[in-house]
């Protein structure tokens, strides 16, 4: 089980590869995980937004977790494995959290309930029941996707719950982080890739970053330099990533990342499940140019 003190560094949210028929492509998934394990990342997230969780069934999550564990065992690596279990139903979130625990998840990522816009008290109870399962919970606040912004006081109360070990902050600014850091707080992980360095400098413990799938070692360099207090050097490294981050989020995640991985031969195709669709020809060309800059 993942503990609060270990929730730091770069946690990579994996993508879910599909065949042209939109069935799971487990061979490509194995390649994807093996490539990530070539880097000194700190953990993996299965079934997050980057993994197209809205269109992935729980039976498929089980397969992805099993393959992830097999690859780690074969490579002799035992990284924390976090599974996304949050939905906008407390009952299903609790059930999925229980199932994730049975699969051997080290923690679960539970998003603020989306679409139904519950009151703050309802969200707090949602997290209380998820945490009561006994699998460590990482809360996930992302207002632009959920349609609900939690008050800082509500988030503090969520973080005070036994079993909640930290939060992924995708609020789009430093405001929540700065508010939490006014007192003792559990780890805050950056969830907005473009704010990664700024949040590290303010005291974030690390990040759950979709774009760290690409140029992983540079993201790790940014983290390690910042951890050592070498912020000028970490800023320089991060600045080299900014054009890539911007392009990877120019169209909906994870479509640009899937295209890059297919270009690199890690995935067989860049297939997504509807309503997600492939990136434009224009963005393809722009990504080629940005990636070419790293090769020079």
Image: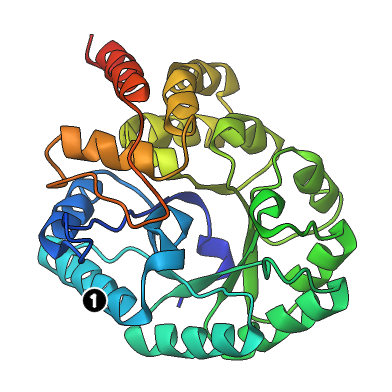
The percent position of residue 217, horizontal first and vertical second, equals 32, 33
The answer to whether residue 47 is seen in the rendering is: no
Q: Vertical placement of 203 versus 153: above or below?
A: above
Residue 25 as seen in the image, left or right of residue 183 = left
Is 56 left, or right, of 172 in this rendering? left
Q: For the C terminus, give its image quadrant.
A: top left
User: Residue 50 location, x and y as percent?
Assistant: 42, 52
Pick whichever, 197 or 288, lies toward us. Answer: 288
Counting from the top left corner in percent of width and height, residue 34 is at 17, 53
Please tell me in which quadrant of the rendered image residue 4 appears. bottom right
Tell me what residue is drawn at x 46 percent, y 18 percent: 243
Residue at x 68%, y 70% (from the top left corner): 113
Q: How many numbered marks have been drawn onto this rendered protein structure?
A: 1
Say which residue appears at 36% left-offset and 36% top-offset. Answer: 256
Judge the density around disc 1: few (<14), some (14-19), many (≥20) Cα neighbours within 10 Å. Answer: few
296 w.r.t. 115: above or below: above
> Can you say which quadrant of the picture contains the N terminus?
bottom left
Which residue does the numbered mark 1 point to in the structure image? 63
In this rendering, is residue 272 above or below 292?
Answer: below
Q: Tell which residue pokes out farthest to the top in this image.
A: 296
- Residue 176 appears anywhere in the view: yes
Residue 232: percent from left, percent from top: 57, 16
Numbered disc 1: secondary structure = helix
């Amino acid at each position: 089980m993942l503990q609060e003190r270990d929730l730091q560094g770069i946690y990579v949210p994996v993508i879910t590869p599909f065949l042209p028929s939109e069935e799971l492509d487990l061979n490509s998934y194995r390649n994807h995980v093996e490539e990530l394990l070539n880097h000194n990342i700190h953990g993996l997230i299965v079934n997050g937004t980057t993994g197209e969780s809205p269109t992935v069934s729980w039976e498929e999550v089980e397969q992805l977790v099993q393959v992830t564990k097999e690859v780690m065992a074969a490579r002799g690596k035992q990284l924390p494995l976090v599974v996304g279990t949050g939905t906008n139903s407390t009952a299903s979130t609790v059930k999925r959290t229980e199932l994730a625990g049975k699969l051997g998840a080290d923690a679960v990522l539970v998003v603020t309930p989306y679409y139904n816009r519950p009151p703050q008290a309802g969200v707090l109870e949602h997290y209380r029941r998820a945490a009561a399962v006994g699998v460590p919970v990482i809360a996930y606040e992302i207002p632009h996707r959920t349609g609900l912004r939690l008050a800082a006081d509500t988030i503090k109360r969520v973080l005070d719950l036994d079993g909640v070990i930290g939060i992924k902050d995708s609020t789009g600014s430093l405001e929540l982080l700065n508010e939490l850091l006014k007192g003792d707080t559990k780890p805050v992980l950056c969830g907005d890739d473009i704010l990664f360095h700024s949040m590290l400098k303010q005291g974030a413990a690390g990040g759950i970053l979709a774009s760290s799938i690409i140029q992983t070692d540079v993201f790790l360099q940014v983290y390690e330099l910042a951890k050592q207090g070498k912020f000028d050097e970490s800023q320089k490294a991060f600045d080299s990533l900014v054009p890539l981050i911007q392009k990877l989020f120019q169209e909906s995640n994870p479509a640009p990342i899937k295209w890059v991985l297919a270009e690199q031969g890690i995935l067989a195709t860049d297939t997504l499940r509807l309503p997600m669709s492939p990136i434009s020809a224009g963005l393809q060309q722009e990504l080629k140019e940005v990636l070419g800059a790293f090769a020079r």
